[in-house]
Image (spheres, rainbow, N blue to C red):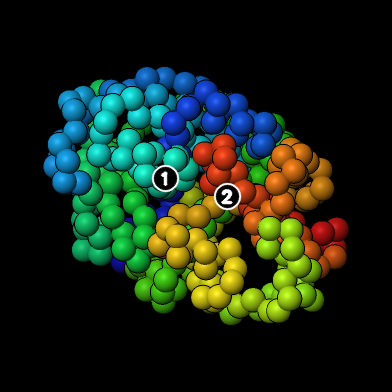
């Protein structure tokens, strides 16, 4: 794919499916200060209701809450609560209890963008929103996740209210997948999404990194393969691919329990201690934490009880 045809610049959205949208929005706003949600009820029509193997009711009703994130509010967090027994969102909520569902790309030419995905992924569902735009959901085996394409117009009300500076929401940086085969996943995001990819890294963390899993110091080194690609209109957001060692660690647990897929969102911050205060106030030890003073401080906060999956916050540099 030519860079001029890349889908990566059109990334704008991370979507969660939840069972209690009011509670999830309140908790997200508390844990990620600076998020301000607007809510609406939408009633999309499922064009291909039997692709998932189950006929969905017509129409599908959803409660929707949206909040801008990123330094200029250029990205969006969306919460969806299914109100009907549909095969796309309700099935996910029933199976998982809610959490990260997919990322979305808002494209100017939906048919052309769909052709780029069709060769390396399969169409899972198509819905038409009552306002007149369409959403296509593709199942991407290399990532173990769905990707949404839509031709939804930009929402000016969201763009007009970016998160306040120095609040965590303004530091949205990354979406991260845990995968079985990082080579296949890298090839997919590079060739299908058109991401610019940094060199792959084999990382070894362990006692010298003050590595902890669920608050307990790791007794030995932990290896992980990592690839990072660029996303978004200014290529400042990232898609991270992680392939962990298959041993006793929380990333390998995710693969064992859920299979490959979208695992967490991340925020790169200038002041870890200040900006993680709400997340640390829950008292739940991070699923994974590393801290090399003066180099890096990173924590994966377990927010699954809030239906918000995992949230990573990290700081690098001399003040970490």
Residue 88: image quadrant is top left
> Toward which corner of the image does residue 294 lie, by quadrant?
bottom right
Question: Which quarter of the image is occupied by the N terminus?
Answer: bottom left
Q: Position of residue 307 (x, y in %)?
A: 52, 39
> Number of numbered discs present?
2
Q: Is 76 above or below relative to 181? A: above
Question: Which of the marked residues, 2 or 1, is nearer the chain's N terminus?
Answer: 1
Labels 2, 1: front one: 1
**45, above or below 168, in the image:** above
Quadrant assignment for the C terminus: bottom right
Q: Position of residue 310 (x, y in %)?
A: 57, 49
181 left or right, relative to 287: left
Marks 2 & 1, CB-CB < 8 Å contact: no
- Using the numbered discs, state the Cα–Cα distance from disc 2 to disc 1 in whole angstroms: 14 Å
Please state the horizontal and vertical placement of residue 210, each as a whole percent of the image. 78, 69
Task: Tell whether 53 sits left or right of 304.
Answer: left
Residue 125 shows in this picture = yes
From the viewer's perspective, tell me whether residue 202 is left or right of residue 104.
right
Q: Nearer the viewer, residue 176 or 171?
A: 176
The residue beneath circle 2 is: 310
Residue at x 74% of width, y 63% of height: 216
- The residue that mark 1 highlights is 96
Label 1 SS: helix
275 lies above or below 84 = below
Q: Give the residue at x 46% y 45%.
A: 100
74 with respect to 192 (left or right) = right
């Amino acid at each position: 794919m030519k860079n001029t045809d890349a889908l990566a610049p059109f990334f704008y959205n991370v979507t969660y499916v939840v069972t209690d949208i009011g509670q999830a929005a309140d908790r997200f706003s508390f844990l990620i200060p600076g998020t301000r949600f607007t809510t609406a009820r939408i009633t999309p029509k499922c064009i291909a209701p039997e692709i998932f193997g189950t006929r969905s009711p017509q129409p599908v009703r959803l409660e929707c809450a949206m909040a801008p994130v990123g330094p200029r509010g250029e990205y969006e967090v969306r919460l969806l609560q299914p109100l009907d027994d549909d095969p796309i969102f309700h099935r996910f909520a029933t199976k998982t209890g809610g959490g990260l569902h997919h990322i979305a790309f808002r494209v100017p030419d939906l048919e052309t963008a769909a052709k780029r995905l069709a060769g390396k992924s399969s169409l899972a569902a198509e819905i038409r929103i009552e306002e007149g735009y369409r959403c296509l959901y593709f199942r991407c085996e290399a990532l173990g996740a769905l990707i949404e394409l839509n031709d939804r117009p930009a929402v000016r009300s969201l763009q007009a209210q970016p998160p306040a500076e120095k609040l965590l929401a303004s530091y949205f940086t990354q979406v991260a997948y845990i995968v079985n085969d990082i080579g296949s996943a890298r090839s997919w995001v590079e060739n299908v999404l058109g991401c610019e990819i940094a060199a792959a890294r084999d990382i070894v963390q362990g006692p010298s990194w003050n590595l902890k899993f669920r608050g307990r110091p790791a007794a030995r080194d932990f290896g992980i393969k990592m690839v990072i690609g660029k996303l978004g209109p200014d290529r400042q957001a990232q898609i991270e691919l992680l392939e962990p060692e298959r041993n006793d660690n929380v990333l390998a647990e995710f693969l064992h329990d859920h299979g490959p897929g979208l695992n967490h969102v991340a925020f790169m911050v200038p002041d870890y201690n200040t900006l993680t205060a709400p997340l640390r106030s829950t008292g739940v030890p991070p699923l994974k934490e590393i801290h090399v003073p003066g180099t890096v401080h990173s924590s994966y906060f377990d927010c699954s009880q809030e239906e918000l999956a995992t949230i990573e916050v990290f700081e690098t540099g001399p003040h970490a």
